[in-house]
Image: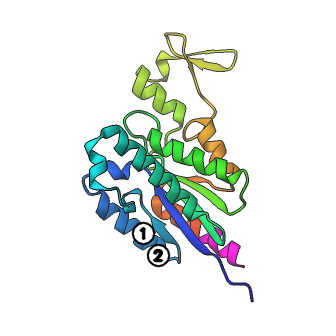
């Protein structure tokens, strides 16, 4: 009988910057464990104290550890999921580090069939609406030309009806993933995918 593969999930997002990051990570990992998925949070990485003496060395150590953690999630004989918190952070778009992590897993998914990317956000607005409201004072200050949306300074606004930049939405959807409006909904999708892989 074929042994079912372990399902591992990397929890990407700006959660690491919050004062209660450890509590958030434990709560999210517990919800994943309840449906048979092993969760991993960037703060699970052990960075040596000496690395923090040099900011650049620290940055490289953290980035390398996070990349390795993502690769470990989708290693041979495992099914890897990245659950990306896409709630806007420091602007109308998602956290840029999380965007990189989505791209990193998307690149791995180009050569591996054991990866699923799921995004979640508590902001239901379209990307173009957030940009218009937060950077330009609302859509009434924008203009349309030949079906495209522009700001008063002539900058084109990406308006494809997505939850964020098109490269992010494409990366998620090409793996069979979706963008949902809560972490719980993301876990439900991950559970459904895991069950399909085990069937």
Residue bearing the label numbered 2: 33
- Residue 97 image position (x, y, % from top left): 46, 42
Residue drawn 60% across the image and 51% down it: 105
- Residue 146 image position (x, y, % from top left): 70, 15
Q: Nearer the viewer, residue 120 or 5?
A: 5
Q: Quadrant of residue 42?
A: bottom left
Say if 88 sits above or below 144 in the image: below
The main secondary structure of the magenta stretch is: helix
Which secondary structure lies at badge 2? helix
Separation of marks 2 and 1 at Cα, in angstroms: 6 Å
Residue drawn 38% across the image and 63% down it: 44
Task: Look at the numbered discs 2 and 1 and tell me whether their residues touch, using CB distance below 8 Å.
Answer: yes
Which secondary structure lies at badge 1? helix
- Residue 147 image position (x, y, % from top left): 68, 20
Is any part of residue 169 visible from this angle? yes
Relative to residue 110, is residue 135 drawn left or right? left
- Residue 137 image position (x, y, % from top left): 40, 21
Residue bearing the label numbered 1: 29
Say if 2 sits above or below 74 in the image: below
Q: Which mark is residue 64?
A: none
Q: Quadrant of residue 80?
A: bottom right
Residue drawn 50% across the image and 72% down it: 38
Question: Is disc 2 surrounded by few (<14), some (14 to 19) or many (20+) residues within 10 Å?
Answer: some
Residue furthest top as drawn: 153
Span colored in magenta:
191-199
Q: Nearer the viewer, residue 11 or 67?
A: 67
Q: Nearer the viewer, residue 133 or 171?
A: 171
Residue drawn 46% across the image and 53% down it: 66
Relative to residue 147, is residue 25 drawn left or right? left
Residue 124 lies within the magenta run: no
């Amino acid at each position: 009988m074929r042994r079912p593969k372990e399902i591992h999930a990397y929890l990407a997002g700006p959660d690491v910057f919050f004062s209660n990051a450890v509590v958030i990570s434990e709560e999210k990992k517990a919800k994943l464990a309840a449906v048979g998925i092993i969760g991993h949070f960037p703060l699970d990485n052990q960075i040596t104290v000496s690395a923090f003496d040099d900011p650049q060395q620290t940055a490289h150590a953290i980035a390398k550890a996070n990349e390795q953690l993502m690769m470990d999630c989708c290693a041979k004989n495992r099914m890897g999921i990245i659950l990306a918190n896409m709630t806007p952070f420091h602007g109308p778009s998602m956290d840029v580090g999380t965007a990189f992590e989505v791209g990193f897993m998307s690149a791995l998914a180009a050569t591996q069939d054991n990866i699923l990317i799921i995004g979640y956000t508590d902001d239901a607005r379209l990307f173009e609406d957030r940009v218009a409201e937060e950077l330009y004072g609302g859509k009434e200050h924008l203009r349309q030309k030949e079906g495209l949306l522009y700001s008063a300074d002539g900058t084109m606004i990406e308006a494809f009806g997505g939850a964020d930049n098109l490269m992010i939405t494409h990366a998620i959807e090409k793996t069979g993933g979706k963008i949902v409006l809560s972490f719980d909904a993301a876990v439900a999708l991950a559970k459904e995918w895991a069950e399909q892989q085990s069937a």
